[in-house]
Amino acid sequence: MEMTARASFIQAVMLALMLVLSSSSGWAQKQKGSSLKTVELCNGSDHVSPEARIDGCTAFIEAGEGALNGFVVAYNNRGNAYSAKADYERAIKDFLEATRLDPNYAKAFNNLGVAYLRTGAHDLAISAFEEALKLNPNYGAAYANRAAAYLKANAYDRAARDYDEAIRLDPKLEAARSGRCWTRAVLGALQAALEDCDIVLRSETNNAAAYDSRALINLKMGQFSAAIDDYNSALRFAPKLASALYGRGLARFKLGDTDGGQSDMSAAKKIDARIDEAFVRYGMP
């Protein structure tokens, strides 16, 4: 599974910067059109590109005008833009600055955790998500993101508990339900896992991760043809998904297709040399 591997959980903070700036002693009314445009760009209005958003936030920060909360949101927004460009080192610096300026800003801690997770710093990610949840215990996305971090650390029981809480708080959080499907499949709660995957796939028919998860369920249930069908669907949307290639290889072996099975498993190992070890953890030696 992929943060969330499987998911992308965090959206940019929308409209917050404009609201903050508009409340600060008539600041907005005193600015020229170019300054207002800078605020709009930093805020992400009109679906601007990450580059334009970075430029807008940088201009606002360097101008040094406005309320403290405006700078907090500007650093957070610029961090989101850097994350969108996969420039996680700069994103982390901006999120850290946002949390330094406002230690009570739960969204910045959550976004910091996502950036850490995408760089493979799982322990730091978990710590950041924990800070977000201390500040906002009802933050469903932060639970889902911490669950993704636990998955990366192979802490499946903890991941399952966090996914449960994320879905309790936000039943429409499809990324959490997809992640829980995978977690339940690994833990052996196959019928419950199947229900989660089916719910996700009814609304997201191109979700490679959910097909991959359901395929593992079918593999564990001995439904090898169904597993191959789901792995084929996963690979149609994510051709380099090593778990789908390796799982399809196992299913083909089970059906007597030795050549096909070996071909798939070899291709999977070229993408992830330790994928066979992962399947042992999943309960499929």
Image (cartoon, helix red, strand yellow):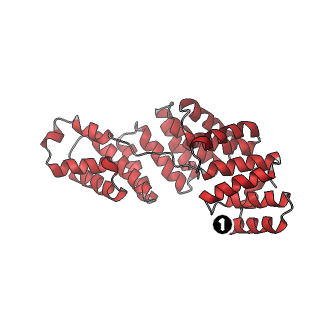
Query: Does residue 31 appear to the left or right of 260 in the view shown?
Result: left
Kindly tell me whether residue 151 is visible in this rendering: yes
Residue 275 in the image, given as x and y percentages of width and height: 72, 60
Query: How many numbered markers are drawn?
Result: 1
70 on left or right of 262? left
Q: In percent of the image, x 72 and y 54: which residue is there?
A: 229
- 99 sits left or right of 203 in the view: left
Q: Amino acid at mark 1?
A: Ile
Pick the quarter of the image with the C terminus.
bottom right
32 or 89, nearer to the observer: 32
Q: Residue at x 22, y 37 (%)?
A: 22
Can you say whether 31 is above or below 273 in the image?
above
Q: Nearer the viewer, residue 196 or 232?
A: 232
Image quarter for residue 147? top right
Image location (x, y in percent) of residue 37: 22, 50
* Residue at x 66%, y 40% (from the top left corner): 198
Return the x and y of residue 75 as percentages of the image width and height. 34, 49
Res. 153 visible in picture: no
Q: Please, what secondary structure does the residue beneath circle 1 have?
A: helix
Residue holding disc 1: 271
Say which of 184 and 66 sits in front. 184
Which residue occupies the foreground of this view, 193 or 159? 193
Residue 214 placed where, x, y %?
70, 47
Residue at 56% across, 40% down: 174
Question: Could you classify mark 1 by the number of other residues whose Cα lies within 10 Å: few (under 14), some (14-19), or many (20 or more)?
Answer: some
Image quadrant of residue 248? bottom right
